[in-house]
Image (cartoon, rainbow, N blue to C red):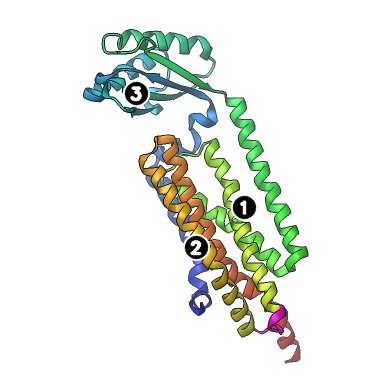
Amino acid sequence: MKHIFSKKIVWFLIPVVCVALAVAAFFMYGSIANQSINSDFYVSGGTIMSVAAGKEAVDNYDASVSKIENVLYRNGVDYTNAEYELSTQDYKDQAKIIVRYSDVKGADMTQLNVTISEQLAAEFAEFATVENIVSYDTVNKSLMESTILNALLAVGIALLIIPVYMLFRYGWANALSGLLSSLIALVVFISLIVLTHIQINNAIIGIFAYVILATAVGNIVVFDKVKYLRKKLDFKGTKAEAQNVVGTAVCKALKGIFGFAVVLLLSALIFAIVGTKGISMAALAVICGTVAAFYSVILFAPNLSVILITAPDKKKAKAKK
């Protein structure tokens, strides 16, 4: 595993490159990127409406969407930022168009949604094969804000508790390495989210906690092996010894971590391919989170640990000079 340490500058530059690319992508996408990050109806509150248009939805999808847009426009909804998704299920005549749109400021959304659903039912009455042509669910803004706040709070608490645990179990060097690697994993994860144009909603916020936990568990597996090897090999604190101990620990931990990561990535990839848009987005976020955590545990944290572990030895060497 010598290449892990010989290319540490490359590994340390990866987060910088990811952030730079994410910033460039943000400005390149322009209003689209802004919409994905700031205007997601899951965060601002909105409605998920299902229109059972049957074969019409499949055969004349664009025309069907245009009809929906006209209804939304007449009722003051920002139809340009609405999302449309075709759901064919098992049979073509049961096809539905799923539309998601944000709340209208100052409007009584309860009454507005009733009006919109009635108008859409009238528009698609001749094509529908089911009695209940239009159905909808609402996303409460206050509830979503509370959910997101609680998720972020959980992430913050985890970032405090995990390093404290590592401090008492592994010492300050590994505790600091664990904390910084978790933060770096989050930075890489957010950068990948922007680069892949995944909409940030409450489900994606929840995956932030997954990234922290995955990174922490990976670090604990590696640090446990480092602790054992330091005792076994009578560790003196030199750079060569540190690289040998940490490198060996990473190799031993990698066997279990790699297998778990591959299974998780393949499972998430299947969901990303065959799932609905919401499931696909969440699966892609899991893939991004797993890649970020894997990088942080296997490449970033080991190099940082070696630097921090050998820091006292370097100070002693300078003092003798």
* Camera-nearest residue between 279 and 93: 93
* Camera-nearest residue between 104 and 92: 92
**Residue placed under numbered mark 3 in the picture:** 97
Which mark sits nearer the N-terminus, 2 or 3?
A: 3
- The Cα atoms of the two marked residues, 1 and 3, are separated by 37 Å
User: Disc 1 or disc 2, which is closer to the eye?
Assistant: 2
- Left/right placement of residue 69 relative to residue 18 reads left
Residue depicted at 75% across the width and 91% down the height: 320
Q: Which mark is residue 258?
A: 2
Which mark sits nearer the N-terminus, 1 or 3?
A: 3
Residue type for callout 3: Ile
As drawn, which residue projects farthest toward the bottom? 321
Callout 1: SS: helix
Q: Residues within 10 Å of mark 3 (few under 14, many from 20)?
A: many
Residue depicted at 67% across the width and 77% down the height: 229
As drawn, which residue projects farthest toward the right? 168
**Residue placed under numbered mark 1 in the picture:** 213
Quadrant that contains the C terminus? bottom right
Could you tell me what secondary structure mostly forms the magenta stretch? loop
As drawn, which residue projects farthest toward the left? 59
Residue type for callout 1: Leu
Extent of the magenta region: 231-238
- The Cα atoms of the two marked residues, 2 and 3, are separated by 40 Å
